Amino acid sequence: MKNLALLLLLFLYNESGAQTFLTRNGFIGFYSKTPLEDIRAENKQTYGMIDATKKNIAFTLLVKGFTFQKQLMQTHFNENYAESDRYPKANFVGTYSGDVDVSKNGIYPVVVKGQLTFHGVTKDLEVPASIEVQDEALIGKSEFKLIPADFDIEIPSIVREKIAQQMDVRVNVKCNKIK
Amino acid sequence: MTKNIITCLILLINSVAFSQDTTLLKQLEDSMPQQLHQDVSAGTFKATQIINTPTVESPGKNGLQFLIMHRFGRINEGAYALWGLDNATIRFGLDYGISNRFSIGVGRSSLDKTYDGSFKWKMLQQTKGRMPLTASLYGLMTYTTLKYDDKPYLTSKHRIAYVTQLLMARKFSSRLSFQLSPSWIHFNLVPTPEDQNDLFALGIGGRMKITKRTSFNAEYNYLPTGQISSTIVHHSVSFGFDIETGGHVFQLVFTNSEGMIGPYYLAKTSGSWGDGDIFFGFNISRAFSFKKR
């Protein structure tokens, strides 16, 4: 019985010992630039988790949490493009390659690979990123491009000139160690 | 022996729990509170008016909307007047959003050369699990400036009318929305003593999306009889088709009301669908934004 308690303790210790980092206010933004119109959409309530022992990464966010500089754009994004009533969440699950020494502060370049699900469509994604170790936190940053059409998002010809073919996506998450 | 079994068991549980990549995601989603974003229903209607009746929608904060409402003449005028296309009445309007819930507007109609000022205040917002409908209070004041040679007694106070409407809308699904609009109209001056200065009407309207960017709209404004006796007034019945393209909303409409502001379509609808007094027309809105980047 004593042994069992000890084991349980060990087990719990192990759990906390797993190098897991979490954020509830990560930043993900996407940007479209055309001569006619600039679109800026930012979500500052992204949930993100990094498991440094398994090198796993996951993100999830509520699509309605993207804010635009124009109210009307936000309505159109939710109503006509992202259909956030039908597909309320977007998420990413994947792994990263590259060595990150969580005990040593510094910026480590990595490659993140996984699956991105948005608008009900899951796509493979492989992007360069960086993980910065800052004491008890990991700061993940990445910039890449996404094509709306890949996610079954139609852009009608009449607004074609105002919405870029590719969206610039920016990720900046600071995950704190779970104790 | 038992120790070993337990160790094995724990190891097994541990490995199972981490064997899938999605576990991390599941953990994340479990930690996400349900109420993170109160699920506010946006976009109950595409435009700020169903056809003539205002909707619960208004320009967002720092948004300016320019609205052109246009009605041709009666279709039953026949070929000589090209089925009404020879004549037109028009209203220009500007609406500005002071906040996401409060907007003010001004307008000018060619019918009786009428100026109007209005406000719209979104009091309640439909939110999943918390609030079943969106409600806006709409107030409008109109001032007619048409000159009458035979009515020199018409001073400014006689030219004013007010409309107050409680707009209650519910977005039933992403395609279907309905709105109930009890309305109170006050005329400072009515043609005969038998006519009421204060009138009440009940409007019902809705929209059904056909595609993501187009919808079919209809509205019916019921004016209980006995309130106006000097003229024959019909209930206002209108149908419309919305086409939304970015910052524009085009509405093609058929209505038996010539006027496009409260006192006119609610209490002065002289046309009857049965007699072919149908006005074809359109509303075009253009949204501008003044939000600092």
Image (cartoon, coloured by chain):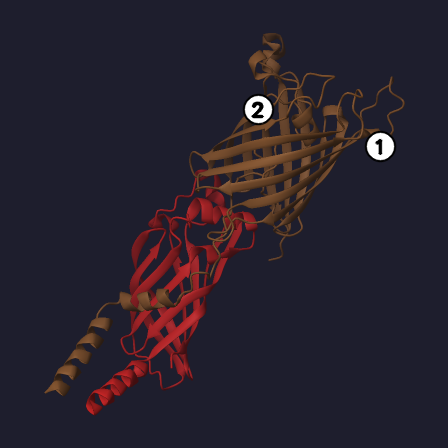
Chain colours: A red, B brown
Residue at (53% x, 52% y) in the render:
A38
Residue B261 shows in this picture: no
Position in image of residue A19 (x %, y %):
32, 80
Residue highlighted by disc 1: B157
The amino acid on which the numbered mark 2 sits, given as a three-letter code, is Val
Q: CA distance from mark 1 to mark 2?
A: 30 Å
Foreground of the two, A81 or A131 = A81
Please identify the quarter of the rendering in which residue A143 is found: bottom left
User: Which residue has dot 2 on it?
Assistant: B237
**Residue type pointed to by label 1:** Lys
Q: Would residue B35 appear left or right of B248 to someone viewing this image?
A: left
Looking at the image, residue B120 lies above or below residue A12: above
Q: Position of residue A48 (x, y in %)?
A: 39, 68
Q: Residues within 10 Å of mark 2 (few under 14, many from 20)?
A: many
Q: Quadrant of residue B78?
A: top right
Chain under disc 2: B
| Residue B95 versus residue A52 in the image, above or below | above
* B164, B70: nearer the viewer: B164
Foreground residue among A46 and B3 = B3
